[in-house]
Image (cartoon, rainbow, N blue to C red):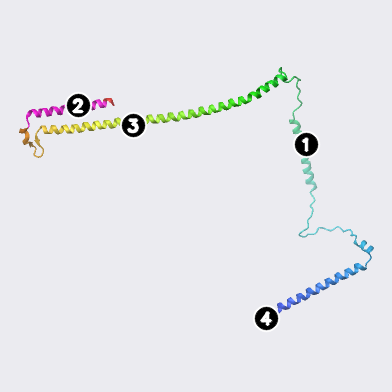
């Protein structure tokens, strides 16, 4: 029920609005037709007089969104600014006049010295002709200088590498000498251990029981004496070799 009443109200409102719009359009069309009839029936001279615009009276500024208002400047402040400007301009002009250079008074003399114009032109022609060769010489000197700098740099790098190689060679030689010394010491030690075995066998004791071996009677005395002599000679030779090696190092 409520929905039907609201729908009927909205329909009645739209009908009333359409009726009002048609009535308004009809009245506007009647007004236009009446104006056209009056213009046709009126006098053209009177229309010309009526068409002249009348002078508009001065209107006060309106306070609306699109209006603007001119603000008059303050005369006291304006006069103060003008006087300040004049004073600054006068100070600037006086400063320029004080810094301006005065007239120059020189005694007149002939320019160019003692050389004539022809000589000067000849010198200029010679300089112009030689400028090409001078540029070439300068270019060659510059290239020569660059080459010397590059060679000096390369030589410096070579010297540095040579020093490194010499140090490495010395280090290797030192390592070889140390290795040889260790080898001789080890050799001397091994020979001594080997000769000590002969010394222990010369006593003819059995190591297991601490008693003289049964093979003593089969070994002649001459061979025992010769073995002892060989051991002593080997020891002397080892000691001499070791001393000679240490002296050379």
Q: Secondary structure at mark 2?
A: helix
Q: Position of residue 116 (x, y in %)?
A: 72, 18
Lower sequence index among marks 1 and 4: 4
Q: Which span is picked out in magenta?
A: 219-246
Residue 90, labelled with which disc?
A: 1
Look at 80% across and 74% down and name the residue there.
23
Magenta segment, prevailing SS (helix, strand or loop): helix
Q: Position of residue 124 (x, y in %)?
A: 68, 23
Lower sequence index among marks 1 and 2: 1
Label pair 2/4, CB-CB below 8 angstroms: no
Label pair 3/2, CB-CB below 8 angstroms: no
Q: State which quarter of the image contains the N terminus.
A: bottom right
Label pair 4/3, CB-CB below 8 angstroms: no
Frontmost of labels 2 and 4 is 2
Q: Which residue is mark 3?
A: 172
Residue 4, labelled with which disc?
A: 4
């Amino acid at each position: 029920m409520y929905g039907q009443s609201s729908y009927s109200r909205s329909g009645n409102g739209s009908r009333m609005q359409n009726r009002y719009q048609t009535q308004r359009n009809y009245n506007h069309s009647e007004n236009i037709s009446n104006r056209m009839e009056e213009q046709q029936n009126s006098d053209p001279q009177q229309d010309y007089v009526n068409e002249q615009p009348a002078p508009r009276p001065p209107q006060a500024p309106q306070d609306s969104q699109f209006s603007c208002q001119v603000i008059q400047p303050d005369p006291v402040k304006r006069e103060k600014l003008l006087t300040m400007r004049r004073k600054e301009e006068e100070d600037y002009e006086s400063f320029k006049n004080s810094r301006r250079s005065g007239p120059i008074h020189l005694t007149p003399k002939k320019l160019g010295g003692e050389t004539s114009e022809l000589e000067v032109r000849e010198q200029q022609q010679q300089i112009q002709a030689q400028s090409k060769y001078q540029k070439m010489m300068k270019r060659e000197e510059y290239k020569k200088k660059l080459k010397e700098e590059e060679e000096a740099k390369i030589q410096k790098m070579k010297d540095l590498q040579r020093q490194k190689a010499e140090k490495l060679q010395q280090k290797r030689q030192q390592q070889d000498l140390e290795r040889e010394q260790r080898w001789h010491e080890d050799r001397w030690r091994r020979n001594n251990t080997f000769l000590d075995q002969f010394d222990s066998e010369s006593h003819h004791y059995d190591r297991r029981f601490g008693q003289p071996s049964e093979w003593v009677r089969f070994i002649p005395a001459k061979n025992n004496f010769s073995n002892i002599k060989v051991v002593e000679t080997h020891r002397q030779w080892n000691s001499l070799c070791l001393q000679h090696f240490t002296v050379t190092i």
